[in-house]
Image (cartoon, coloured by chain):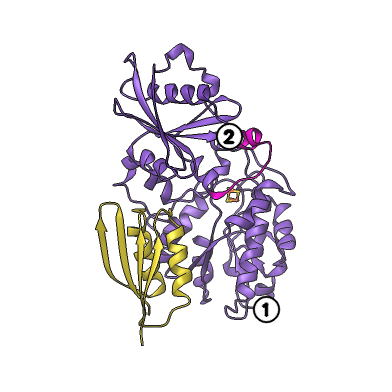
Amino acid sequence: MLAARVIQEQGVHVEGINFFTGFCVEGHTHAIRRRDVDKQKRNNALWVAEQLGIKLHIVDVIEEYKDVVLNPKHGYGQHLNPCLDCKIFMVNKAAAWAWAEENGFDFIITGEVIGQRPKSQRRETMPIVARESGADDRLLRPLCAKNLPETLPEREGWVDRSRLYDFHGRNRKPQIELAKQFGFTEYSQPAGGCCFLTDANYSKKLADLWRSRGSRDYELDDIMLLKVGRHLRPRPHFKVIVGREEGENHYLSGYKHQFVTLNTTSHPGPTALVDGENLDASDLTLAARIVARYSQGRDAPEVTVEAGYPGGDAMTLKIAPLASPELDPAWHV
Amino acid sequence: MSELIELDARRLLCPMPVIRTQDRIRTLNTGDRLVVHCTDPGVLHDIPAWCRINGHDVLETRTEGRDITITIEVR
Ligand code: SF4
């Protein structure tokens, strides 16, 4: 946001580009959770574009991004976040879009600051992103440009280097100060990452998914479901995803054509999905007992659970909810 | 002749409905109308914001239960 405004101030026409990888922390996570419904669910990129008065292009990169997550050449950060490869990928995509004839842009800017992120925003990684993305010296970082070699837009006089910045390190004060100067009353750059891959619990669930399937791959539905509900894996070949409130229950029930869906019918309770193959009767009974444990019938001697199959068949199970000691904490993914 | 086009973005979560809207509008002409059907309440905020940024008009927003319909005029 700041980088864009710095360049706009120099009379340069700026447009925004935002990539949707499927892992982005966005409004949809709120939308799933009913209790967040009344909270403002704004899309951050759209909001920033509106503040800046620039156009924004949102690009779906879900498919292509898989290779970044599954095979990061530069490895992962603290969790399953392939930040450096991710930046290279995004700058490369942005460049392809920007240089395209119908768009005709001359250079790309990012808001990176040297030393702001321990792994992906270091002095050494800056040229790697520029080189490997193919953007080379058409990639300008207005917030720390003065600490970096001159780029094409500076050499050509498209932007005035003396009016760029030399921010570095984790101290955000100078940036907050600049935001104030620009009159941005609300300025919040996330201190953590911009996506779920930087989240320890989320990464654990993704690693569990790969392990259980015996292959490192995923579909959009898989990674969306990892954001929803409690995930319990009582046996290696299946896991149960239990909705935590109405919004999640509703979201999960949207998957009834893909998964076995469990609902308690004798007592109010959650909706749950069973994700696994070759499920036998004892697997289903165990899954139903877990679901019953999270229903209002948890202390009842018997709870009725309806199991719906993707094909439309249904089965009724009368089971005893799982008692506390029976639920192994290690099942929680 | 301006056209009336329908877009089904139900069950998609934001920002997918916005992306679908954006990509569809790219193929339309000024004066065409696009009716987007959605279920994620996030669109109530995101689609009008996207339209404001890109200069299109939101003519109508209707909510019936979980179904949301947004009518946009392409500018
Ligand atoms: S935190 Fe940001 S840079 Fe890192 S992987 Fe996620 S989107 Fe990419």
Whether residue A208 appears in magenta in the rendering, the answer is yes
Of residues A77 and A180, the one nearer the viewer is A77
Q: Residue B42, image x and y in percent?
A: 36, 54
> Which label sits on residue A156?
1
Residue extending furthest front?
A313
- State the CA–CA distance, disc 1 to disc 2: 60 Å
Please name whichever residue, A126 or A302, is drawn nearer the observer in this view of the structure: A302
Determine if residue A150 is in view.
no
Chain the render paints yellow: B
Depth check: give the residue in front, A310 or B1.
A310
Q: Amino acid at mark 1?
A: Glu
**Vertical position of residue B24 compared to residue A206: above or below:** below
Task: Name the disc covering residue A186, or none.
Answer: none
Of the residues shown, which amino acid type is indicated by label 2? Glu
Residue drawn at the location 33% of the way across and 38% of the way down: A246
Which is more N-terminal, label 2 or label 1? 1
Q: Secondary structure at mark 2?
A: loop
Which chain can be seen in purple?
Answer: A
Residue numbers of the magenta segment: A207-220
Q: x%, y% of residue A233?
A: 54, 27
A63 up-or-down from B57: above or below = above
Residue highlighted by disc 2: A277
